[in-house]
Amino acid sequence: MEYRRLGKTELMVSEIGFGGEWLDGKTFEEGRAIADKCMECGINIVDCWMSDPEVRSNLGNALAGRRNKWYIQGHIGSTWQKGQYKRTRDLAQVKPAFEDLLERLGTDYVDLGMIHYVDDFDDLDKVLHTEFIDYVKELKESGKIRHIGMSTHNPLVAAEAVKSGVVEMIMFSINPAFDLMPPTDNVDKYFEEGSYSDLAGNIAPERAELYKLCEINDVGITVMKGFAGGRLFDDKLSPFGVAFTPVQCLHYCLTRPAVAAVMAGFKSPEEVEGCVAYETASDKEKDYEKVLAKAPHHAFTGQCTYCGHCAPCPMDIDIATVCKFHDLALMQPEVPASVREHYKALKHPADECYACRMCHDRCPFHVDIVKIMRKCKLLFN
């Protein structure tokens, strides 16, 4: 298992995480078997947004005796009211729900206190400028949460949260299909039939800029909806008209800037093994790029996805990384100092490119790589 730094939290998390949502309806024994397999495979981060008391208790029992082996994402604002889930900012409901989470998980703290499900600006204002954020900060000061995070599906809301300086990481919905979609405050639109019919096929600029903004501000990302609820595994349901494998979806998510972990939902130990197969997969098995390039619908064009198919370079330039630094540099009026230093640390910078164009023949998305190399010479020198 590979581990990645989750931004400024400094936590080293497994790049494949345990999304606890599918524990709903599972017995304790079934949940324990999944948790056991996760630990056996090196997974060390789990998300619990579910407010169902039985799910919380089963997860807590599954982690019992090994709390120190896990980083927990616990959500603030997910409550259980009259036998069903309810998202709320009412502290009279929020506070007992969070205390219930700690009690049922059998712990006195969670590592990542997630401001739960903020998808529109009115709600963002409520959580950042009312007594709600005061409560979250109190939880951090008391040690009941170690870091402040937020979950959202809206890239514009996520960007404002990052700029606020309050959140240290975000949980965000990422996959090849969702990345095509413009910002929305209604996550259901991502799953509606026909939502992708009029799209040109490139990553929505708001989403691409969010990933770069997170990287520049050292705000780590954990991924939800990495498989689009399984939709991408079926060529009849996939908006691309082709099916992906779990390994290809994982690789797509893990090649986005600032992403540290993909929180995969598991219904069985076998599904854990299916995802962890990513760690030993070949480049061919990880290859989502050719699937997208050959898709009958919405193939990405002209935009670097940092896939690495341009390699090898005869001058040993890490082309995908140079392209990423190029994109990060263009986000600000001046090149951020951190990006400039990372670029300078490259063993082989863009200056060494002599425009042989071998990379052009390999790029599945027809990116003008030589043009980017030339621009980098100007940007960083």
Image (tube, rainbow, N blue to C red):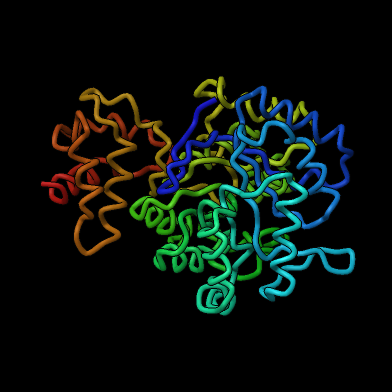
Q: Position of residue 107 (x, y in %)?
A: 68, 45
What is the total number of numbered labels drawn onto the structure image?
A: 0
The residue lying toward the viewer, choosing from 25 and 103, is 103
Q: What residue is drawn where x is 83% and y is 68%? A: 81
The residue lying toward the viewer, choosing from 41 and 74, is 74
Q: Quadrant of the N terminus?
A: top right
On screen, 354 above or below 134?
A: above
Q: Is residue 213 left or right of residue 37?
A: left
The residue lying toward the viewer, choosing from 40 and 238, is 40
Q: Is residue 100 left or right of residue 319?
A: right
Image-quadrant location for residue 205: bottom left
- What residue occupies the far front of the structure in this picture? 142
- What residue occupies the far left of the structure in this picture? 381
Q: Position of residue 154 (x, y in %)?
A: 55, 64
Q: Position of residue 312 (x, y in %)?
A: 32, 24
Image-quadrant location for residue 245: top right
Q: Is residue 303 left or right of residue 240?
A: left
Q: Position of residue 122 (x, y in %)?
A: 57, 79
Q: What residue is drawn where x is 38% and y is 53%? A: 212
Q: What residue is drawn where x is 55% and y is 61%? A: 199
